[in-house]
Image: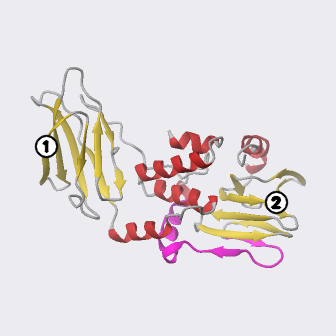
Amino acid sequence: MLWRVLSLLLVGLLPLFAWANERVGVALDVRGAVVLISELNGFSDESPLQRTNALAVGNRLQLAEGAEVVLMHLGSFKRYVLRGPNEVTVKEGGFVAKRGKAEVQEAAGGGTLMAALGKGRKAVNMPEVAIGVREVSKKLGDILLVTPVDKERLLGGEQLLSWHALSGVEKYRLLVKEMGGALLLEQEVVGESFTLAEGLLKAGGRYTWQVLDESGSAQSEPWRFEVVSEGERAELQGMEPASGAAMSEQVLYAMVLEKMGVVSAAKRQWQRLHELDPADPLFARKAK
């Protein structure tokens, strides 16, 4: 299991990582013997490398003959492929190979989306490999909305809206408005969900939605959502991993979706990863 020693790596190396300004690297696919070296005050700690988010400025990776590792740098969101025998040092600007050069794999679509995401590196949440989704509002109301969550971004197409039912209430009134206040949809619903038809939501559109009981005496707080632009959707489609793609591509795609706030699509991607590797604790947690 790729994550088997992650907790041991983080606990054992945490004091040594304190000297580095930031953890700027993620190791995705690791094949063969790769050793992570951290140095502090003349002392060094060496640990076998498996997939981890704990790469910091100044760390060295030693790759044995035939070893290969896929690295992602969080400053540029570029992927690097390094093959042994070689040694690589983690720098602010990327990964520097001692002999030869690491192969830089640009993101699909010219890398413009990835480069833009890299601008927010100082806000990256590093306890996990995954980039954290935008903060979700805690606004609740009498009726509790479920999905899409407040401030979520959507890919477009058909969209399911769902909420928790009130005891004894069967009929609800669903309101969907454009952010400017124009009413887009008013619908009586029996049950706890309704699917918006494809074409109703526009690319780049911003909306609010709210659910009331039949009398209007109980209601949810209005939550917001927006649809990604046509350009963003095209870039994401270009990045979507094909069936059987490398684990690094699939993890990276889930991370990008989360960074963009496309919460539901990111969760579906984590669920696919969990199916591929049910024992991975990160995939299991993200798939819930």
Magenta span has 114?
yes
Q: Position of residue 274 (x, y in %)?
A: 57, 45
Q: Position of residue 121 (x, y in %)?
A: 55, 60
Residue 185: say if magenta. Answer: no
Crowdedness near tag 1: few (<14), some (14–19) or many (≥20) residues, C-alpha within 10 Å: few
The residues colored magenta run: 94-121
Image point (71%, 56%), residue name: 55
Q: Position of residue 52 (x, y in %)?
A: 69, 52
The three-letter amino acid code for the residue at tag 1 is: Gln
| In this view, 246 is above or below 268 | below
Secondary structure found at label 1:
strand
- Disc 1 and disc 2 in contact, CB within 8 angstroms: no
133 displayed left or right of 157: right
Residue with the mark numbered 2: 32
Mark 2 residue type: Gly
Query: Which quadrant holds residue 96?
Result: bottom right
- Farthest top residue in view: 168
Give the CA separation, mark 1 to mark 2. Answer: 58 Å
What residue is drawn where x is 22% and y is 61%? 199
Q: Position of residue 63 (x, y in %)?
A: 84, 64
Q: Is residue 258 visible?
A: yes
Image mark for residue 187: 1
